[in-house]
């Protein structure tokens, strides 16, 4: 092992191929004004996984109000849910207190608040409250755990989606964001 070993996920989509989510790459040409979404789970040096998703606006154009609203909802979801990841908090507590985007923006395709990271996507899987009761399990956040906090804002029937993830280390004093990739300022402002 000397570097990047393999990719578990490699979603790179733009414009109408961002929604619904999980469409594979295609030969579609990225157009100015498109949202461009990238999601990668890269297994790198030593076999440890990195899972970071970002969405950007293509070109030197002004974002639409809809693009701004979707991005703001996804960004807020990630930021607020990172704050919940405190040592000693149960998975059920995170699920119940987790921030979801407003009605019409929350996508059922994004079932989790956060999932564990290590040698792949692994324990724990903390589901959103709408799925926790039927498919979730409880546990406790512990220092040393690395989790990926997820957001997918993909309004049904709309042409675009926003995907954002942050990788977070649980420390004895709280969450520490490990992701170094910046968010898209032109969609935030």
Image (spheres, rainbow, N blue to C red):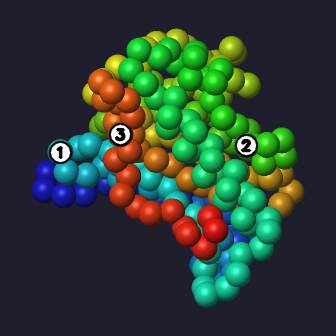
Could you tell whether 133 is left or right of 115 in the image? Answer: right
**What label sits on residue 46 in the rendered view?**
1
Instruction: Report crowding for label 1: few under 14, some 14 to 19, many 20 or more residues within 10 A (C-alpha).
Output: few
Residue 77 placed where, x, y %? 62, 43
Q: Reply above or below: 49 against 90.
A: below
Q: CA distance from mark 2 to mark 3?
A: 23 Å
Could you tell whether 75 is left or right of 122 in the image? Answer: right
Q: Reply above or below: 154 against 36.
A: above
Which image quarter is the C terminus in? bottom right
Say which quarter of the image contains residue 13: bottom right
| Mark 2 or 3, nearer chain start | 2
Q: Reply above or below: 114 against 138.
A: below
Could you tell whether 103 is left or right of 177 in the image? Answer: right
Say which quarter of the image contains residue 118: top left
* Residue placed under numbered mark 2 in the picture: 101
* Residue placed under numbered mark 3 in the picture: 176
Residue ID at (80%, 68%): 65
Residue 177 placed where, x, y %? 38, 45
Q: CA distance from mark 1 to mark 2?
A: 36 Å
As helix, strand or loop, the secondary structure at mark 2 comes to: loop
| Mark 1 or 2, nearer chain start | 1
Residue 188 placed where, x, y %? 62, 64
Q: CA distance from mark 1 to mark 3?
A: 21 Å
Say which quarter of the image contains residue 100: top right
**What label sits on residue 38 in the rendered view?**
none
Residue 71 placed where, x, y %? 67, 59
Instruction: Report crowding for label 3: few under 14, some 14 to 19, many 20 or more residues within 10 A (C-alpha).
Output: some
């Amino acid at each position: 092992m000397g570097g990047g070993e393999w990719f578990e996920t490699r979603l790179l989509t733009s414009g109408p191929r961002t929604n619904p989510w999980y469409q594979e790459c295609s030969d579609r040409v990225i157009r100015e004004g498109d949202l461009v979404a990238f999601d990668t789970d890269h297994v790198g040096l030593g076999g440890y996984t990195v899972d970071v998703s970002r969405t950007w606006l293509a070109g030197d154009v002004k974002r639409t109000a809809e693009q701004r609203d979707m991005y703001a909802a996804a960004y807020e979801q990630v930021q607020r849910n990172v704050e919940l990841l405190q040592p000693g908090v149960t998975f059920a507590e995170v699920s119940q207190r987790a921030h979801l985007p407003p009605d019409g923006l929350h996508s059922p395709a994004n079932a989790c608040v956060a999932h564990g990271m290590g040698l792949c996507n692994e324990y724990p899987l903390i589901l959103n409250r709408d799925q926790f009761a039927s498919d979730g399990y409880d546990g406790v956040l512990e220092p040393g755990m690395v989790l990926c906090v997820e957001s997918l804002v993909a309004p049904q029937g709309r042409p675009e989606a926003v995907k954002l993830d942050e990788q977070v280390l649980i420390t004895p004093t709280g969450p520490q964001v490990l992701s170094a990739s910046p968010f898209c300022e032109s969609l935030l402002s």
